[in-house]
């Protein structure tokens, strides 16, 4: 190819100056950890020093305790600091928030079993429905609107793509090929799925009836939700289950696992299956494929009765839980 003239290196942008919390924090303020501080093995020590110096209160949101309560779903060493940070940080929290009542129960049961004292009982906050959607992009080839079923998730053993693959293998044995919708996995490849990926490759991706959309952006994801026939989320264990509530926000019925938090995420609007019962999942999915009237009835109920939770309601609940019931409401109402 023709040579391209080298471009001058851009001038580095100086990092913004961030004040030290030890200098600006004061009694009555709240340090709230909403993300994943468990990546940092020294987090609890710094929280203890900061709150002791400033008089600030500390609150944290626990998304799940899966590496501790179901370690079989994680490679050894994948979350090396998780247990340490949880053991040391939870006792420091003046408010413990969770993304579901299932997670709240996990936190209460695990800390009790470990003899970890808590300053407050874990409490769930409502989780907003859907994501800030850009204009949907083009549907990735070779997909056609209404001709595929969507499973959004990292491909990992806990998410149970294995069950979906087995169901589709059986559907293709039992039904005419043109009656079986394409199965779409949208996400990335995670851990402990080498055997599954080899099995998929051995079938040549079900001879085209299984399509993998790697790490779709929001515009592509919006198009996939908009144009799918229905969705799957067959996970063994979740803290919440965003693909369930995301599906409902697009008006799409979800065939969901009946475990842990997923019935909280889906309410009465999902078709629930046992993630360990592949025959039961096969029967439920085949019923939706062969009886479009049943799917239409479920979609009608979803359109008429489903009330999405605004993300501002999540923010208001966090403020109330951390600052007290008299805290001002969130003023931003952008997006659900």
Image (cartoon, grey):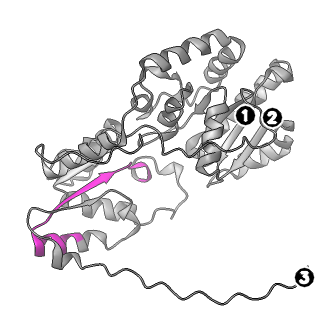
- Above or below residue 286? Residue 71 is below
The answer to whether one can see residue 156 in this image is no
Tag shown at residue 255: none
Q: Secondary structure at mark 3?
A: loop
Q: Return the disc, 2 or 1, that comes first in the chain's sequence.
A: 1
Q: Nearer the viewer, mark 3 or mark 1?
A: 3
Q: Secondary structure at mark 1?
A: strand
Residue labelled with disc 1: 183
Residue 305 percent coordinates (x, y): 42, 18
Count of numbered marks? 3
Residue 58 part of the magenta-drawn span: yes
Task: Give left or right: position of 140 versus 287.
Answer: right
Q: Quadrant of residue 147?
A: top right
- Above or below residue 132? Residue 225 is above
**Depth order, front residue of 144/284:** 144
Residue located at (50% from left, 29% from top): 248
Q: Nearer the viewer, mark 2 or mark 3?
A: 3
Residue labelled with disc 3: 2
**Depth order, front residue of 3/171:** 3
Report how far apart the C-alphas of labels 3 and 1 lie in the structure.
43 Å
Residue 37 percent coordinates (x, y): 36, 64
The answer to whether one can see residue 297 in this image is yes
Callouts 2 and 1 close, C-beta under 8 Å: yes
Label 3 crowd bin: few (<14), some (14–19), many (20+), radius 10 Å: few
Residue 276 part of the magenta-drawn span: no
Callouts 2 and 3 close, C-beta under 8 Å: no
Magenta region: 47-67
Residue 153 percent coordinates (x, y): 59, 45
Residue labelled with disc 2: 209
**Depth order, front residue of 329/108:** 329
């Amino acid at each position: 190819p023709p040579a391209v003239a080298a471009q001058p290196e851009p001038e580095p942008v100086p990092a913004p100056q961030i004040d030290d919390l030890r200098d600006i924090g004061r009694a009555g303020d709240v340090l709230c950890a909403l993300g994943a501080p468990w990546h940092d093995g020294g987090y609890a020590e710094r929280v203890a020093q900061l709150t002791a110096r400033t008089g600030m209160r500390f609150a944290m949101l626990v998304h799940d305790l899966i590496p501790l309560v179901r370690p079989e779903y994680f490679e050894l060493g994948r979350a090396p600091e998780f247990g340490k940070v949880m053991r040391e940080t939870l006792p420091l929290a003046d408010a413990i928030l969770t993304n579901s009542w299932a997670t709240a129960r996990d936190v209460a049961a695990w800390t009790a079993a470990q003899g970890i004292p808590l300053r407050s009982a874990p409490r769930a906050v409502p989780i907003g429905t859907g994501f800030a959607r850009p204009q949907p992009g083009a549907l990735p080839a070779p997909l056609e609107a209404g001709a595929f079923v969507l499973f959004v998730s990292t491909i990992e053993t806990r998410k149970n793509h294995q069950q979906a693959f087995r169901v589709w293998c059986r559907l293709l044995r039992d039904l005419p090929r043109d009656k079986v919708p394409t199965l779409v996995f949208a996400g990335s490849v995670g851990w402990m799925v080498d055997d599954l990926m080899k099995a998929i490759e051995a079938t040549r991706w079900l001879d085209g009836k299984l399509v993998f959309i790697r790490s779709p952006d929001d515009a592509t994801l919006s198009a996939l939700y908009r144009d799918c026939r229905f969705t799957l989320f067959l996970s063994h264990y979740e803290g919440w289950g965003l693909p369930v509530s995301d599906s409902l926000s697009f008006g799409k019925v979800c065939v969901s696992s009946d475990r842990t938090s997923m019935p909280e995420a889906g309410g009465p609007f999902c078709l629930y299956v046992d993630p360990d019962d592949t025959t039961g999942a096969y029967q439920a999915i085949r019923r939706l494929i062969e009886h479009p009237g049943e799917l239409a009835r479920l979609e009608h109920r979803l359109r008429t009765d489903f009330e999405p939770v605004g993300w501002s309601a999540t923010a208001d609940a966090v403020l109330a839980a951390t600052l007290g019931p008299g805290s001002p409401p969130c003023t931003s109402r952008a997006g659900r």
